[in-house]
Amino acid sequence: MKYTCIDYRSEMKLLGLKRRLEEENLSEEEKALILQEIEELEKAMKMN
């Protein structure tokens, strides 16, 4: 299986989202949106 730039970009985006989720000043709405985006990205990367 080849590892492509798209794979790398997806992994970096996922890491960035998880880091943002750790921020203390996020509203519940922002947290929900980030969690949803993480879930969609993990599904697209077949991580779940």
Image (cartoon, rainbow, N blue to C red):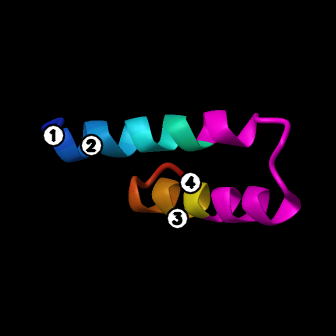
Q: Main secondary structure of the magenta part?
A: helix
N-terminal-most mark, 3 or 4: 3
Task: Give, as a single range, the part of the protein colored magenta.
Answer: 18-36
Identity of the amino acid at label 4? Asn
- Residue 40's disc number: 3
Identity of the amino acid at label 1? Thr
Residue 44, position as x, y percentages in the image: 41, 61
Identify residue for label 1. Answer: 4
| Kind of element beneath mark 1 | loop
Q: Residue at x 50, y 53 (%)?
A: 42
Q: Is residue 17 above or below residue 40?
A: above
Residue 26, position as x, y percentages in the image: 80, 48
N-terminal-most mark, 3 or 2: 2
Identify residue for label 2. Answer: 7
Q: Nearer the viewer, mark 4 or mark 2?
A: 2
Identify residue for label 4. Answer: 48
Q: Quadrant of residue 31?
A: bottom right
Q: Nearer the viewer, mark 3 or mark 4?
A: 3
Identity of the amino acid at label 2? Asp
